[in-house]
Each structure stands twice: as C-alpha cells, then as structure tokens.
Image: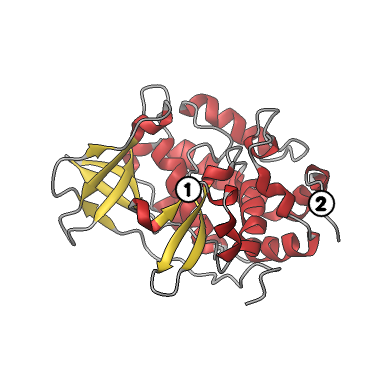
C-alpha cells in the first residue's frame, strides 16, 4: 500500500444494527465531564461488549452527533469503529466496538507505532476532510485511535473516533441549530479559536503535507449520493431530536459537502507543512 495517499473509499452505506443490553452497564473511567456519558455493556444478541454514549443534562446531542458523523465517515470509506445503536431499558444510545487495553492505543500519534499502521499516512487527510465537512473542532491525538487488527503479525490500523462535537457543537438543540444555519454558508471560519486541532496537542497536523491528497478525499466525500445522506438522517431515532433539527443537519451536510474543496483551500494555511 502507498502510505502517502489515503486508501480508496468504498462509497457504500450499511444499515445501522441495533443491539440490546444483556446485563447491567458499567461506566468507563471518568477523566472528564464528557466521559461521564461513556458506558460498556454486554449485548444480548451476540454476547459481545460494546461501548455506548448517553446524553448529559446540558449536552443532549452527544449520541446524535456521534451517529451521524460515524455513518457519514463510513459512507466516505473513512475508518470508524462499527457504529450501532444500543438499547438499554428501552432507551436508545449511540454504540460502537469496545476495545480492551491490549487491542488499542488511544495516544496513537504520540507513539512510534503509529507509523506502523497500515493506513497511517492516509488517515490524517481523511480526518482533515471529515472535520472540515462536519465542522468538528475536536481532533487531538486521543481522537485518532490505533486498533490491533492481527496480533500474530502485529498489524495495526488507525480509526477516527469521538465526534460528539461534530456538526458545530454539542449544545442543546436550539443553540446548535443556529450554528448549523450559520456554518451552512459561512466557510471562512473552521469553528472558532478553541478548535482542538489548532492546539499544540494536535501534533498530527504536521503530517498533512499534500493538498492533492486532501482533494482526493474531498472527491470521495462529494461522491456520496444524496440518497445515502438521507438514509443516515432516517437512521436517527425519533427520540433523539426534532424533525426540524434533523432537517437542519441534512441541509448543513449537503451544503458543506458541495463546498468542501473551497473550504479546504480557504484553510490550507492552517497546516504548516502543506505543499501542492
């Protein structure tokens, strides 16, 4: 594989599986306010552990934004951890694969093993394009994860994770909708001055060196049919948001999908080593 370019994406959309909790959920280690929404549970259908994310009192859109971002990433061929819906006591939450400590490295770009991942070069371009498209401000080193795919051959693969702040914010619906409306046509700002990947912690931005590679990923994203985007919107549980907010997300996604190459050109100076 050529590590200098992103892998070809498969522009396919798979339906969202729903699993039911088969036992009592347990909270993962709490390291921040948002990590209080993280739980793991064994699912009844296949007895496999999965992580799920709930809402928090002042952050009601966490599951919705995670699901939309993960499904759109998958439609563009960008590696994500199998998104699904987990039902716990009749409530639906965003779910994904649960990896144990020996299966993953969350501080992926801080360690030399990142360069051994089979898609190490390509995923940084995919992360930039996904975040530019979906207005995700939260892409520091911890939000690119390495997964051990083959222990015998020590094969690792990189994945994008943690998209609760995608679509401009994880604020309550009324405030979030205003940001969607603003950034559906305002492409001069990425998000705001708190954007995580502009922080020194986002050291992976030094790996973005080719604008041609960004354009190739943008072409994949622009190739996602509107019918696929509609299917993503239809997968959102009705209890998660109003129909009006879902329609606002759809308009936002379609607008920025069309404008993505221009958005990337506007912000190319954000990457210190970016060439042709």
The residue shown at (66%, 70%) is: 3
Task: Return the residue nearer the eye: 178 or 160.
Answer: 160
Q: Secondary structure at mark 2?
A: loop
Q: How is the image coloured?
A: secondary structure
Q: Earlier in the sequence, mark 2 or mark 1?
A: 1
Image quadrant in which the N terminus is located:
bottom right
Instruction: Pick the residue in front: 105 or 139.
Output: 105
247 or 205, nearer to the observer = 205
Within-10-Å neighbours for mark 1: few <14, some 14–19, many 20+: some
**Residue 190 in sight here:** yes
Determine if residue 55 is in view.
no
Residue 227, horizontal then vertical, whole percent: 51, 62
Q: Residue at x 52, y 46 (%)?
A: 107
**Which residue was labeled with disc 1?**
106
Q: Dot 1 lies on which element?
A: loop
Kindly give the residue lying farthest to the bottom in the view shown.
1
Total numbered circles: 2
**Percent position of residue 47, x then y:** 17, 58
Residue at the image position 33 percent from the left and 52 percent from the top: 100
Res 178 → quadrant: top right
Looking at the image, do the residues carrying marks 2 and 1 touch, with CB atoms under 8 Å apart? Answer: no
Q: Residues within 10 Å of mark 2 (few under 14, many from 20)?
A: few
Q: Quadrant of residue 54?
A: top left
Q: Position of residue 93 (x, y in %)?
A: 31, 42
Q: Please, which residue is most extreme toward the right here?
A: 276
Residue 19 sits above or below residue 153 on the image: above
Q: Is 76 situated above or below 90?
A: below
Q: CA distance from mark 2 to mark 1?
A: 24 Å
Residue topped by disc 2: 273
Q: Quadrant of the C terminus?
A: bottom right
Image position, residue 122 (x, y; %): 64, 64
Which residue occupies the foreground of this view, 199 or 74?
Answer: 199
């Amino acid at each position: 594989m050529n590590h200098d370019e992103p892998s070809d994406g498969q522009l396919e959309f798979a339906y969202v599986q729903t699993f039911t909790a088969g036992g009592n959920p347990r909270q993962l280690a709490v390291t921040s306010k948002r990590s209080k929404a993280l739980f793991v549970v064994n699912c009844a259908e296949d007895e496999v552990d999965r992580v799920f994310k709930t809402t928090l009192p002042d952050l009601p859109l966490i599951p919705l934004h995670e699901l939309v971002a993960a499904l759109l990433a998958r439609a563009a061929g960008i590696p994500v951890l199998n998104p699904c819906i987990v039902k716990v006591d009749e409530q639906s939450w965003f779910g994904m694969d649960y990896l144990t400590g020996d299966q993953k490295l969350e501080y992926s770009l801080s360690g030399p093993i990142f360069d051994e991942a089979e898609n190490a070069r390509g995923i940084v371009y995919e992360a930039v394009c996904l975040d530019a498209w979906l207005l995700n401000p939260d892409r520091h080193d911890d939000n690119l994860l390495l997964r051990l795919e083959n222990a015998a051959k020590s094969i690792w693969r990189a994945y994008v994770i943690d998209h609760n702040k995608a679509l401009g914010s994880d604020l309550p619906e009324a405030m979030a909708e205003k940001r969607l409306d603003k950034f559906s046509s305002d492409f001069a700002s990425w998000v705001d001055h708190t954007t995580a990947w502009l922080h020194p912690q986002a050291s992976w931005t030094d790996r973005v060196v080719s604008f041609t590679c960004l354009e190739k990923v943008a072409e994949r994203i622009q190739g996602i049919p509107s019918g696929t985007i509609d299917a993503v919107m239809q997968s959102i549980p009705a209890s998660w948001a109003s129909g009006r907010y879902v329609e606002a997300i759809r308009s936002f996604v379609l607008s920025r999908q069309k404008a993505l190459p221009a958005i990337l050109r506007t912000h190319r100076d954000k990457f210190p080593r970016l060439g042709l």
